[in-house]
């Protein structure tokens, strides 16, 4: 494994960048800042390697307020919690409300200083294709109860799979939903929108939301709606349809309910017909959140040294996120899978990305 400096943070600490390689020449670069996937290089149908993720060239922009969680590990609770509030064992907790879709405040991706803005520690002896990061989140960090010990492992296998696996333990009851948040553009050219990518999702239902992007509790069928990706469909084919869920989110920004199964189950398949690249996602989680970059804006990448990699400017719908997860707002929804982690138990989340070409 090669390792190098990834630049200094505002407090003077140095972040590092680690390069994982496999037998076929695929390369993944990950940083200890935010346990972040910085780049993923895979070949197109002509064998040409290209980076298929959005990111930055150094650590500092990842800590900035305009970073839309590029490649990050988010937590303690990925996705949204209504009004930043939940109860646990009869005790109320108040979290930061750092997001306000529709003008309605909510807690998003762990708060003001979530796991994506923490410098993680490398644990164990990293190998050429595997590395593990650890973050100890003290009791009360961002308002969450209990001291949580979180670990994230990245492994790049010779089967052309990038495995992201998260585990966590706690010394007091708490809530956990660790989520990987890479932005994919399989063309290798992030100046191109992903509307021509073909997406399929292994789900017959999705979670409708209110105007604040909080699930209503309903599990709505996708059949006959623009939310139906049970067969490969271009992302741009129906994204601007006059459909309430799409109007609220300005496109796709929703959690789909995956078909039940034991262990790893297929979650989604993303394919770029132009390059031939395909990404298949499998997980052990109950949902997958598909986000099509509806709130990406060139203004966030055009100034103050905050350009994307290679000076690129990432614009509206220039990538697609495939975030496997527990359901949003599950601490407040008793009919959703419970996000509660108790002492003596281990939280585990496995996400497998498989890369191929046609």
Image (cartoon, rainbow, N blue to C red):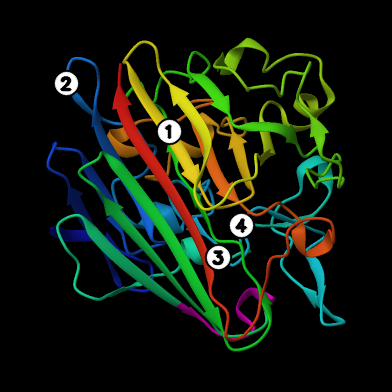
The reply to whether the C-beta atoms of the residues labelled 2 and 1 are less than 8 Å apart is no
Is 197 colored magenta in this rendering?
no
From mark 2 to mark 1, how far is it between C-alphas?
A: 19 Å
- Mark 3 vs mark 2, foreground winner is 2
Q: Which residue in the rendered view is the most extreme toward the front?
A: 262
From mark 3 to mark 1, how far is it between C-alphas?
A: 28 Å
| Residue annotated with mark 3 | 114
Residue 5, by quadrant, is bottom left
Percent coordinates x, y for residue 297 in the rendering: 55, 31
| Residue annotated with mark 2 | 47
Mark 3 element type: loop
From mark 4 to mark 1, how far is it between C-alphas?
A: 21 Å
From mark 3 to mark 2, how far is it between C-alphas?
A: 38 Å
Q: Nearer the viewer, residue 262 or 290?
A: 262
Mark 2 element type: loop
Q: Few, some or many C-alpha atoms within 10 Å of disc 1 (few <14, some 14-19, many ≥20)?
A: many
Q: Residue at x 78, y 55 (%)?
A: 336
Q: Nearer the viewer, residue 197 or 63?
A: 197
Q: Few, some or many C-alpha atoms within 10 Å of disc 2 (few <14, some 14-19, many ≥20)?
A: few
From mark 2 to mark 4, how far is it between C-alphas?
A: 35 Å
User: What segment is highlighted magenta in the picture?
Assistant: 136-144
The C terminus lies in which quarter of the figure?
A: top left
Of callouts 4 and 1, the N-terminal one: 4
Q: Is residue 69 visible?
A: yes
Percent coordinates x, y for residue 88 in the rendering: 80, 78
Of callouts 3 and 1, the N-terminal one: 3
| Residue annotated with mark 1 | 280
| Residue annotated with mark 4 | 78
From mark 3 to mark 4, how far is it between C-alphas?
A: 9 Å
Q: Nearer the viewer, residue 303 or 162?
A: 162
The N terminus lies in which quarter of the figure?
A: bottom left
């Amino acid at each position: 494994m090669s390792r190098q400096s990834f630049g200094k943070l505002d407090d003077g600490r140095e972040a590092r960048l680690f390069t994982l390689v496999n037998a076929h020449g695929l390369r993944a670069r990950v940083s200890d800042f935010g346990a972040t996937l910085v780049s993923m290089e895979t070949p197109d149908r002509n064998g040409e390697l290209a980076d298929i993720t959005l990111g930055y060239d150094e650590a500092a922009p990842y800590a900035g307020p305009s970073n839309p969680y590029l490649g990050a590990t988010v937590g303690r609770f990925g996705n949204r919690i209504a009004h930043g509030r939940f109860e646990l064992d009869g005790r109320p907790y108040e979290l930061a409300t750092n997001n306000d879709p529709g003008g309605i405040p909510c807690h998003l991706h762990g708060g003001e200083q979530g796991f994506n803005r923490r410098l993680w520690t490398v644990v164990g002896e990293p190998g050429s294709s595997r590395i593990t990061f650890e973050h100890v989140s003290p009791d009360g960090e961002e308002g969450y109860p209990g001291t949580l010990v979180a670990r994230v492992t990245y492994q790049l296998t010779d089967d052309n799979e990038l495995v992201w696996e998260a585990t966590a333990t706690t010394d007091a009851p708490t809530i956990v939903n660790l989520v990987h948040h890479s932005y994919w553009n399989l063309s290798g050219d992030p100046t191109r929108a992903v509307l021509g990518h073909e997406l399929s999702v292994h789900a017959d239902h999705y979670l409708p939301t209110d105007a604040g992007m909080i699930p209503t509790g309903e599990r709505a069928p996708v059949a006959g709606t623009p939310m139906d990706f049970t067969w490969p469909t271009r992302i741009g084919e129906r994204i601007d349809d006059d459909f309430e869920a799409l109007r609220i989110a300005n496109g796709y920004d929703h959690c789909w309910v995956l078909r039940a199964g034991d262990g790893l189950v297929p979650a989604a398949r993303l394919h770029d017909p132009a390059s031939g690249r395909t990404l298949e996602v499998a997980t052990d989680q109950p949902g997958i959140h598909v986000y099509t970059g509806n709130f990406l804006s060139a203004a966030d990448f055009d100034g103050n040294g905050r350009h994307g990699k290679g000076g690129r400017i990432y614009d509206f719908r220039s990538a697609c996120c495939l975030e496997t997860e527990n359901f949003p707002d599950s601490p407040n929804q008793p009919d959703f899978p419970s996000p509660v982690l108790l002492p003596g138990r281990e939280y585990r989340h496995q996400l497998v990305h498989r890369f191929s070409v046609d």
